[in-house]
Amino acid sequence: MKKVQVLKKSYKDYLQFLEEDDREEMDQLLKKLQGKKIAMINATEFGGGVAEILHSFIPLMQDMGLDIDWWVMHGEKEFFNVTKAFHNCLQGDDACLEQQTIDTFFKYSQLNANKILNWEYDFVVIHDPQPLGLVAWRKAPDISRWIWRCHIDTSTPNLDYWNYLQHYIQQYDAVIFTMEDFVGEGLDAGRLYFITPPIDPLSYKNIPLEKEEAKKIIDRFGIDSNRPLITQISRFDPWKDPLGVIEVYKIVRKEFPSVQLALVGSMASDDPEGWDYLYMALRRAGEDYDIKIVTNFNGVSNLEVNAFQKASDIVLQKSIKEGFGLTVSEALWKGTPVIGGNTGGIRLQIEDGITGYLVDTVEECAEKVLTLLRNPALAEEMAAAGFEKVRKEFLITTNILKYLRLFNDLL
């Protein structure tokens, strides 16, 4: 286990995003929680939405006066192959749960648990399946409250995997899902909480950029900013459907020959499968030089992601399964229209036909892309409605307030 060091943030800078009533409630809850110690645990320091949230969440809570640490568990490739299988099967993949998988998961859970035996935290928040098993080594008696935060879509899980992991889930004092539809069978309703993931409006990924400035940044990746651009920003993962996005582009190009596609992704240390899907996307793109596939290994950081979202005509998140999809809120925050897969947490962000479009197929997605390209006024109207929804519901200040309420409940 490794403790992550984070850059400082100022809570005062974020007060502008809080309504007066929420600010007063935040102050009251912070007073009640003074002196309490909090630990957040996940699988990776960089790559993916959870790590991104924690890089903002942790320093903001520290600046609020709370004693909070962030720990990342240790794992080798064999462990992350197993936990990627857990991730996929909790989202519905059909695979058999083998004894070797169970043994590997137990081995690394025990290895990392050695670090927590002497902990003195009041709240321990575990993110996603990778560190889920640590709860089996909590001290007895234990006055700390353990919380499992599931960020993925578990609405139709592989029951072999779900039933196995439920043995661990039942040991938690509270379980957080993004939405009620994700709650699997057999969980105690009295321990359930629902919290959506947030975006940080003042991070490099979301700070205001002028459109011309954003275009200059993405020009470095071979984008012609004078031509229409469709972008999807996500991991290279079967659930994000990058190959389907390429097919959408090919249909759209028949009517808009000047259109370009950018697939922008981050390669995470806990996602060994990501490289396979990156190579599949590169093969599918072939020699079409209007398809740009770039990652953090090509110099894409948070600022470049910000620029792609700002400068694009349309952002896609054509997921087949999606716990939430932070890129939807990110793009809407920048005033860019979004078309998303009709699944999971994307439905919480996109009201179909109001803040964007929800789609089920490649053909439907291409049709909606063409609709927005032909109707820039409609695209602008949808994006404005989406911005307002994000402002009210999906900023990190709202997210922290919900966690403080949960901690207070568990006291």
Image (cartoon, grey):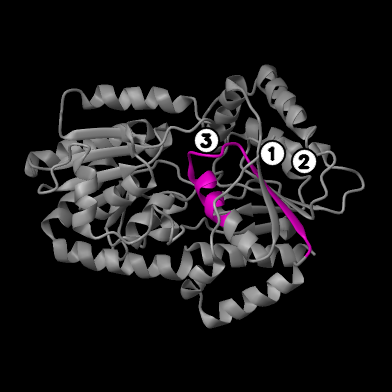
Q: Residues within 10 Å of mark 2 (few under 14, many from 20)?
A: many
The quadrant the C terminus occupies is: bottom right
Name which residue type carries label 1.
Leu
SS for callout 2 = helix
Discs 3/1, front? 1
Q: How far apart are marks 1 and 2 (CA)?
A: 7 Å
Q: Where is residue 232 in the image (x, y as percent from the top left)?
A: 31, 43
The amino acid type, in three-letter code, at marker 2 is: Val
Q: Give the mark toward the camera: 3 or 2.
A: 2
Q: Quadrant of residue 101?
A: top right
The residue under label 3 is: 92
Q: Position of residue 314 (x, y in %)?
A: 23, 52
Q: How far apart are marks 3 and 1 (CA)?
A: 19 Å
Which quadrant is home to the N terminus?
top right
- Residue 83 part of the magenta segment: no
Q: Mark 2 points at which residue?
A: 135
Q: Horizontal and vertical percent for residue 91?
A: 52, 38
Q: Are marks 1 and 2 in contact (CB under 8 Å)?
A: yes
Q: Which amino acid does label 3 sit on?
A: Gly
Residue at (77, 53) in percent of width and height:
173
Q: Give the range drawn in magenta.
A: 35-57
The 10 Å Cα crowd at callout 3, few under 14, some 14 to 19, many 20 or more, is: some
